[in-house]
Image (cartoon, rainbow, N blue to C red):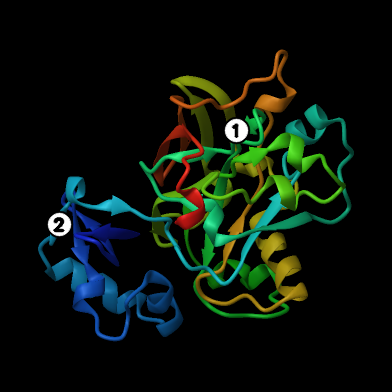
Amino acid sequence: MKLLSFIVDGRPSFGVIKDNGVVDLGARMAGCATLRQLLEAGRLAEAARLAASAAPDHALDRISFAPVIPDPGKIICVGLNYRDHVAETGRTVTEKPALFARFACSQVGHLQPIVKPKVSEDFDYEGELALVIGKAGRHIPPGRALDHVAGYSCYNEGSIRDWQRHTSQFLAGKTFAESGSFGPWLVTTDEIPDPSKLTLQTRLNGNVVQDTTTDLMITAIPELIAYISTICPLVPGDVIVTGTPGGVGAKRTPPLWMRPGDTVEVEISGIGTLRNTVIAEPPDLQAR
């Protein structure tokens, strides 16, 4: 099942992709206005049954895609989780995962523009696999970690490299408003039983800039969930962004930055393609 969050006729909702359209679950399921609320209520199976028997309510070209989870309680990102990326940065592999946070205001949905901040020219792409928690847990053992996952999606962890380097902490360069993207939808775990068997490719203006397989992660997804859930409880709707492979623009000669007018795509097998254009920061961004 492919679940998405969207806006139609000015109304935010969520639903299921079916027959090149969307079954509007937000309009059909009482008590669940958002995808996060659906996960919190444990009603995925009910949503699947409803979508199987319903005709699409909206054509895809009538909706605007929102981030898969527009209102996550937590977005936890993993840094330096592929050896080729560690090597290109000149760092060494850490014993434990490197973690940092993004905020919900830093992400947009599929086909929505991502924003190059006016204070920097060093706007970089990072194609990544994201997972969404579907069942709450704390101190989750690796052997049961995937039972807590609702599904998987694509993420472009847009990074403002000069701001990222202001201090040893990454956050300043990682959560600029509308600088990253999340989508196009969430593919449930029944369709992706093993997230280590996926391919990930990032393209900038059609040119392949990152190409990897998810089995090359340094810390695999079950161990990431176990480690993070030891720090804090994981709850439905939480997002874990699992790290980017080598090939980032900052480490190319010359550096390859995203510019207004560019198109960036993150494609993951079994999920689909997250596509966004890049725009300059508009004057009204503060009011959004």
Q: Amino acid at mark 1?
A: Thr
Q: Is residue 216 above or below residue 21?
A: above
- Is 129 located above or below residue 280 in the figure? below
Q: Which residue is mark 1?
A: 212
Q: Quadrant of residue 272?
A: top left
Residue under the image location 66 percent in, 62 percent down: 222
Q: Is residue 22 left or right of residue 154?
A: left
167 relative position to 52: left or right: right
Q: Is residue 265 above or below residue 205?
A: below
Tell me which corner region of the image, top left, top right, bottom left or bottom right, holds residue 31. Answer: bottom left
Marks 1/2 in contact by CB < 8 Å: the verdict is no
Front position in the image: 283 or 200: 283
Residue shown at the point (67%, 65%) measured from the top left:
225
Q: In terms of secondary structure, where does tag 2 sit?
A: strand
Q: Residue at x 37, y 55 (%)?
A: 66
Which residue in the structure is indicated by mark 2?
58
Label 1 sits on a secondary structure element that is strand
Residue 97 percent location from the top left of the image:
79, 55
Closer to us: mark 1 or mark 2?
2
Q: Residues within 10 Å of mark 2 (few under 14, many from 20)?
A: some
Label 1 packing within 10 angstroms: few (<14), some (14-19), many (20+): some
Quadrant into which the N terminus falls = bottom left
The image position of residue 241, as x and y in percent, is 61, 53
Q: CA distance from mark 1 to mark 2?
A: 35 Å
Whether residue 1 is visible here, answered yes or no, is no
Residue 220 spot, x, y in % from top left: 69, 53
Query: Which of the two residues, 193 or 39, is positioned nearer the viewer here?
Result: 39
Total numbered labels: 2
- Where residue 187 appears, x then y in whole percent? 40, 56
Query: Closer to the N terminus: mark 1 or mark 2?
Result: 2
As shown in the figure, which amino acid type bears the numbered disc 2? His
